[in-house]
Image: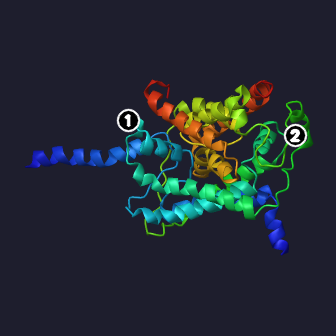
Amino acid sequence: METKNIITKPSIIKETNTDFEVRSLDTICINESNIQHPWWYSIKYGVAGLLFGILLVKAEVISWFRIQEMFRLQSFHMYGVIGTAVVTGIISVWLLKKFKVKTIYGEPIELHPKQFNKGQVYGGLLFGAGWALTGACPGPLYALIGTGATVIIATLLAAIAGTWVYGLLREKLPH
Amino acid sequence: MQIWEWIKQPWPWYVAGPLIGLTVPLLLIMGNKSFGVSSSLRHICAACIPANIPFFKYNWRKETWNLFFVAGILVGAIIATNWLSTGEPVAVNPKLVHDLQQYKIHNYSSIVPVDLFNWPSLFTVRGFILMIGGGFLVGFGTRYAGGCTSGHAIMGLSNLQWPSLVATCCFMIGGFITANLILPVVLNM
């Protein structure tokens, strides 16, 4: 009986962890919550996205012109936006940790440390190149379509294709 | 009324930046979600074209929140463009205007340069490299790096993760090289 327990227990733990392990591969943005909710609980994230989308347009950070100014050191605007966003984020996360703030469902807030791998260098350089060409990172791609630049749908599809090709070649790439 | 006029102007960095930063605690408090956008591209792959690739074999339904979030971005942009804007041209540094003149880029009426990003030019070499080549690099690079400007530069740095600092520096290096050395060649095509 006892040996059976020892054998079965780890396998159960492994199985429940596998999906999280695959899901959290090569990604920062992830659902850390263990609570299962019906899909319509996700509508509130749509509202959060809506506010974020308004910010992206009003700050003009989705503009190809603003990105070119940034990479040519012709304007402080982008540095100001990203800089103050990071400082606000750092203070917020520090406060959340200090006061052990819980989610609205009473779950403790969890943040996992990220491991370094070479992908952050190679991928980072490639994404930087894409950012300079399109003038958009993934968030702005969605926002630009919303502003009426329908041709960006093609760029978004190309980005999805890029992600897919990465998934296909992942094992062969240096990490 | 004056406030309304002010809202319709482009927002300065010291207003927009902190508000963007507040997205981080908002999503964490709403339900333990780490802020980021590029993963949505992976979830779309996992949901629509997994093709038996191990990287796409996971329960994407657990990340539905992210797809709602990006759909929200699109709707937010529609609202901001149609009801919260003056419709005035983008104010650009005269130096950039001067630089872009030589590539026949004159139209500043939209947030994207209409001279470059439009359907007919998608079928030219220049347009294809900018829109399709650039888009491919955005999708491939962000996933290889494990995050984009929101995931690494904002969420990762907020949590003081040094790999995110490395990634953010590489985004900037890649961007500087491309914008100053490669983009002029592409724009001349």
Crowding around mark 1 (Cα neighbors within 10 Å: few <14, some 14 to 19, many 20+) is some
Which residue is painted at 49% across and 25% down in the image?
A173
User: Dot 1 lies on which element?
Assistant: helix
Depth order, front residue of B188/A76: B188
Check the image and name the residue furthest to the front.
B120
Identify the residue at image location x=47%, y=49%. A112
Q: CA distance from mark 2 to mark 1?
A: 47 Å
Discs 2/1, front: 2
Where is residue B75? Give x, y as percent.
Answer: 62, 59
Residue type highlighted by circle 2:
His
| Rendered view: B105 above or below B126 | below
Q: Which residue is mark 2?
A: B106
Where does residue B158 sit, x and y in percent of width and height? 61, 52
> Looking at the image, can residue A88 be seen?
no
Chain bearing mark 2 = B
Q: Residue at x 28, y 46 (%)?
A: A15
In percent of width and height, residue A17 lies at: 33, 47
* Residue closest to the far left: A1
Q: Do we see residue B93 in this rendering?
A: yes
Label whose residue precedes the other's in the sequence (2 or 1): 1
Q: Circle 2 sits in a helix, a strand or a loop, which is it?
A: loop
Quadrant housing the C terminus of chain B: top right
Q: State the residue position of label 1.
A: B54
Q: Is residue B56 above or below residue A31?
A: above
The colour scheme applied to this rendered structure is: rainbow
Of residues A105 and B55, the one nearer the viewer is B55
Q: Which three-letter amino acid code belongs to the residue tagged 1?
A: Pro
In this picture, residue A133 sits left or right of residue B107: left
